[in-house]
Amino acid sequence: MRPPRDTLKNPEQELRVFRLRALLAIVVVLALTGLLAGRLAYLQIVQHEVYSTRSEKNRVRVEPLPPTRGLIYDRNGVLLAENRPTYNLTLVRERVDDLDETLALLVELLELPEDKQQAFRERSRQRQRPFQPALLMSDLDEEQIARLAVNRHRLPGVEVQAQLLRYYPDAEVMSHVLGYVGRINAEELEDLDAGDYAGTHFIGKTGVERFYEDVLHGQAGLRKVETNARGRVLRELGRTDPIPGETLTLTLDHELQRLAVELLDGRRGAIVAVAPQTGEILAMASVPGFDTNQFVTGIDVASYRALQDDIDLPLFNRAIRGSYPAGSTIKPFMAITGLKEGEITPDEVIYDPGYYQLPNDSRRYRNWLRWGHGRVDLERALAVSNNTYFYSLAHDLGIDRIHDSLSRFGFGQRVAADVAGESSALLPSRDWKRARFNQPWYPGETLSVGIGQGYLQITPLQLATATAVLANRGDWVQPRLALEIGDAPVPTELPDTPPDIELDNPVWWERVYSGMEKVLSGREGTARRSGAGLEYRMAGKSGTAQVFSLGQDEKYDAEELQERLRDHALFMAFAPVDNPQIAVSVIVENAGGGSSHAAGLARAMTDFWLLERQDGEALAARQDASEEEGG
């Protein structure tokens, strides 16, 4: 009998294993299918809005629309700041794969010189909000635009945008008063509203452009566009138009401003003219000026360094920031102070031997005329600019009353309503000296202030403002540059206007005016040559401000001094006396005496305003009226 054979296959076992594996496979397939179906359902139903939005973002792009900056005009409609079409190169860093490679290609295509390449790269890395374009270059020429267009496929995230660029037709004449716009920097970006400045690359940096930035800028808009896979715009889906900035009309008269610059003729100095009854600043010139258009697109390093290193300081606004000794231009205000405080009367006479001495002091404070003027009253003291009279008055008043009174005229404070960067200069006091030097105030220092020397410092704008208050018989009207914002006139009466100055006897104003008239028309007037042939009543006062102090017995000799050590020439005036239409302050640095070097400039300003500008306007008004009657 043979033993049983081992079988190689077990059909029944294999069938059970097969069925088990098939069942397991079916379960896995069904599970995976269910999972896939669930995922599809989750994506299509639950997450539909999320992925629909993402898809829409890939297809639809929101682009900011920068507003058009408001225009600036003078009082007669002369355009002072406009917008010219230009093409800017921008870059969105988030859309650039290799920033260094892209920048290198742009430098090559634009053929930038070495001195501009560094600034170009720095602009690309300046802080920007996500997906906001950085301005790399302004005012592209046609050849540069063509090269960028041909290589567009190699420059993802780089765009050439058409935009209006600020332009100043008379840049140097208006440089300091208008200021300029420039590129927004990282510090400014932190403080600006992201919505208002979306797509905007420029902001007011100085002058009117800075002070009225909110008015001139406007409000940004936006547009929705459909793009293809490469980011090219296919069509516009919607738009919210930007709101342009308001038009700003200034109180300035372009022709009077230009005349002021021409009168200074390249000499360092400033001229400010104000309408006393309204506070309108008619002219505010500082010389030398500079070309503000260079700063709009970005001034190159060499040009900016040349301006900074220029010994004449063309970037410095002398009209509002220059601090100068007042010289004898302070004397009419000292006279009003003396009358108001009861220390003098208009007819009181003193004797001037050529000097003044404090009690128990051997030092002699000299009059400019070394042998003296003899008997002088208030009017003659102003006409001949007698120092001895005002030394005596200053001593009787004391520094405390002098400080309080001069501050009422605007000295030692910012006086204008809308002038950015104005300096308060310095009106000294007993407390100021104690805090500054930890020293007491000495009587001799009071005498120096009484003739506009010593610690006293003023700005040309302050002097013009004080002259306007004097012309108004103490009525304050705060100086301003804005005449109209849009179609709305700026009110004359402003909330922060200082209180008026009142005298016990209004006739005293006239007596001070009389002395100031004699400066120009009197036989002994210090500026009688400049007053020859006047066709209207003009009151003025010359001043000579020392750059350095002389010893008691030293004599000033301009010919022996370096030009920048010579005295400053000042003059203040208003006209006509009976109905003031213009108040002027003039300072010419290192020019010498105010009566000989500044009075003629003030006379030219008042002549132009009263005899040419005002008469011309009156004639035009009469012609318009006659034409209406004829019609």
Image (cartoon, rainbow, N blue to C red):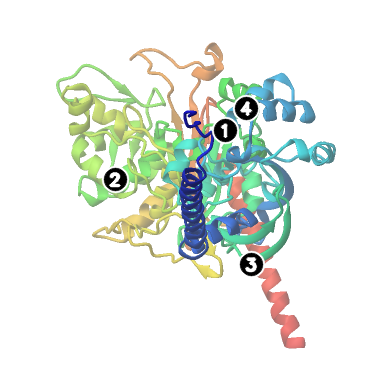
**SS type, badge 2:** helix
Q: Which residue is mark 1?
A: 597
Q: Is residue 45 above or below residue 108?
A: below
Q: Which residue is mark 2?
A: 407
**Upstream in sequence: badge 2 or badge 1:** 2
The amino acid type, in three-letter code, at marker 2 is: Ser
Residue at the image point whose x is 50% and y is 15% from the top = 557
Q: Does any portion of residue 614 appear in the rendered image? A: yes
Q: Does any portion of residue 347 appear in the rendered image? A: no
Q: Is residue 401 above or below residue 478?
A: above
Depth check, front residue: 446 or 156: 156
Residue 452 location in percent, x, y?
36, 33
**Upstream in sequence: badge 4 or badge 3:** 4
Q: Which residue is mark 3?
A: 238
CB under 8 Å between discs 3 and 1:
no
Query: In whole angstroms, how far apart are the C-alphas of marks 2 and 4?
Result: 51 Å
Residues packed near mark 4 inside 10 Å, few (<14), some (14 to 19) or many (20 plus): some
Q: Label for residue 121?
A: 4
Quadrant location of the C terminus in the rendered image: bottom right
The amino acid type, in three-letter code, at marker 4 is: Arg
**SS type, badge 1:** helix
The amino acid type, in three-letter code, at marker 1 is: His
